[in-house]
Amino acid sequence: MAAILELTGVCAHYGRIQALRDVSLHVDEGEIVTIIGANGAGKSTTLMTICGIVMASAGDVRYMGESIRDTRADLLPERGLCQVPEGRRIFPRLTVRENLDMGAFFRRDVDEIEADLGMVFRLFPVLFERRKQHGGTLSGGEQQMLAIARALMSRPKMLLLDEPSLGLSPMISQHIFRIIKNVNEERGMTILLVEQNANIALRLADRAYVLETGTVVMEDSAERMRENTDIKKAYLGQ
């Protein structure tokens, strides 16, 4: 399969502090790829650099065969690349329905928007029940569902998910990951996942990268990664 996303020799800095060092990775169309690593390893920075929130200081980021290294972050959803950031970042003073409408703000295909609205309400029935509530009144799990649903309303080709289970109960986390697997299998959506729970991430993903201090130190299939003795000790609590 062709790579839908490719990073080549990417470096990134916060002031004088180098956060990413020569990061190269790729995500093929239809894959779920996960990045695992300790806190501060550069996982979220990698996603933010892909989206142009953090500017790459070296290397290149290519999406659908074209460089997006210098593309503004707000232009990427219209091109089919959408991030669900860590911390959800919903609009707390807008209703659930208004948050979902914001996900489709650049679209003009009204009939298809309504169809996608029905789709996200089927995936997340609680959002239909809460559709008139302000986003800020939802529970943490419901806000995470809303953040993912809002991203789906942009009809993305690729989703970047940053710590979707952070702060959620195991039951809600399992539901979130079932939805992620569903949109990958049923809609063919390509997904790059950053997730603190390496056990779940490696069971969900096709392939995985390990990031340490801003450097890719391992790449393999998720299945082989789960059986790797070093990975078991470092990230899987075994």
Image: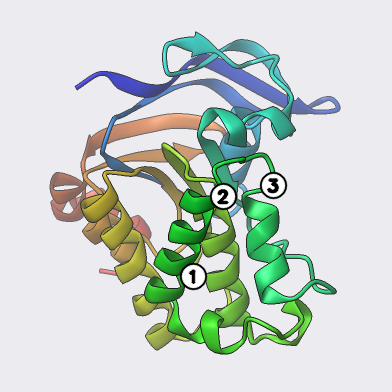
Q: Is residue 81 left or right of residue 202?
A: right
Q: For the point 63% across and 81% down, which residue is it?
A: 131
- Left or right, 51 with respect to 119, comes to right
Q: Residue at x 56, y 33 (%)?
A: 214
Separation of residues labelled 2 and 1 (CA atoms): 32 Å
Distance, label 3 to label 1, CA atoms, is 26 Å
Q: Which residue is mark 1?
A: 165
Residue, x 36% and y 59% (percent of image)? Answer: 235
**Mark 3 crowdedness (10 Å alpha carbons): few <14, some 14-19, many ≥20:** few
Residue 64 x, y percent position in the rendering: 42, 18
Query: Which circle's residue, 2 or 1, is located before the other in the chain?
Result: 2
Check the picture and name the quadrant holding the N terminus.
top left
Estimate the x, y position of residue 69 in percent, counting from the top left. 64, 16
Q: Nearer the viewer, residue 6 or 128?
A: 128
Instruction: Specify the amino acid type for callout 3.
Output: Phe
**Secondary structure under badge 3?**
loop
Give the percent coordinates (x, y) of residue 209.
Answer: 35, 38
